[in-house]
Image (cartoon, helix red, strand yellow):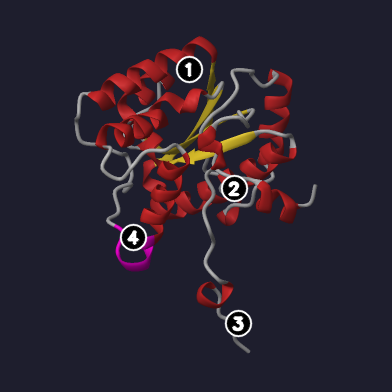
């Protein structure tokens, strides 16, 4: 399948089958992702793929942490306040999601439960955490974004689906404990992945894209 076809067909998957990905395939995919470009070939990503019992324990720990109602304490600036058109797009994305699962605007409990699903990894059999040394700041974040996009396309080529989740960087403490991360390392974001549950209503969610005339300027 061409890269263009993969881009057009992929979507953020929020319901997965319990079927795990073969370990040999996981290794092959993440080895292929090492070809991702980075600034000065720094390759700052330190990726952790969590599966099985360890993933289930981490899911429980994260859910308990979030349910306590404490404020997020991300290692990096993951708390932007969107304005203008960016806020409009954020609301549009949320509306598409909640409409797909039948949650109304005034159903606060339903929205909260849908949000909690982030820290339950949408029941995916695998979750990846993208970490890097904190001092790398914005330059490292750029490289990790490129790496994660590369990875998502390779996953799609192998018939796998994923969901990029900034939410997985908002409460880093249980994750850092589970992964035994050194103090200088921070969690930027995460990604749940596996085989999509095509029958799940939430996976019918689709978002639109801005017209190229408003997004790209061609100069000569």
Above/below status of 117 relative to 35: above
- Between marks 2 and 1, how big is the CA–CA gap? 23 Å
Q: CA distance from mark 4 to mark 2?
A: 23 Å
209, above or below 146, in the image: below
Check disc 1 and report its element: helix, strand or loop. Answer: helix
Query: For the residues marked 3 and 1, what is the alpha-carbon distance in whole angstroms?
Result: 46 Å
Q: Earlier in the sequence, mark 1 or mark 4?
A: 1
Residue 139, position as x, y percentages in the image? 45, 55
Q: Which mark is residue 55?
A: 1
Q: Which residue is mark 3?
A: 218
Q: Earlier in the sequence, mark 3 or mark 4?
A: 4
Q: Residue 118 location, x and y as percent?
A: 41, 32
Q: Residue 99 in the image: x percent, y percent?
A: 43, 44
Residue 25's x, y, as percent?
73, 25
Q: Residue furthest bottom?
A: 220
Residue 149 is labelled as 2
Can residue 15 be found in the magenta stretch? no
Q: Which of the 4 image quadrants contains residue 75?
A: top left
Quarter of the figure that contains the C terminus = bottom right
Residue drawn 27% across and 27% down? 66
């Amino acid at each position: 399948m061409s890269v263009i076809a993969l881009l057009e067909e992929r979507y953020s998957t929020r319901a997965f089958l319990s079927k795990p990905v073969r370990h040999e395939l996981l290794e092959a995919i993440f080895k292929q992702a090492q070809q991702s470009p980075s600034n000065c070939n720094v390759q700052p990503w330190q990726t952790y793929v969590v599966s099985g019992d360890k993933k289930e324990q981490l899911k429980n720990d994260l859910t308990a942490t979030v349910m306590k109602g404490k404020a997020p304490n991300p290692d990096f600036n993951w708390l932007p306040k969107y304005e203008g058109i960016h806020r409009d797009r954020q609301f549009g994305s949320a509306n598409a999601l909640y409409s797909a699962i039948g949650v109304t605007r005034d159903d606060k409990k339903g929205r909260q439960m849908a949000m909690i699903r982030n820290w339950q990894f949408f029941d995916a059999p695998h979750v990846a955490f993208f970490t890097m040394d904190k001092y790398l700041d914005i330059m490292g974040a750029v490289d990790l974004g490129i790496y994660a996009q590369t990875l998502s396309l390779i996953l799609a080529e192998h018939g796998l689906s994923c969901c990029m989740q900034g939410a997985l960087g908002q409460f880093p403490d249980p994750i850092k404990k589970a992964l035994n991360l050194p103090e200088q390392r921070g969690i930027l974001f995460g990604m749940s992945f596996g085989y999509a549950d095509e029958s799940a209503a939430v996976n019918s969610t689709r978002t639109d894209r801005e017209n190229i005339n408003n997004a790209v300027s061609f100069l000569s």
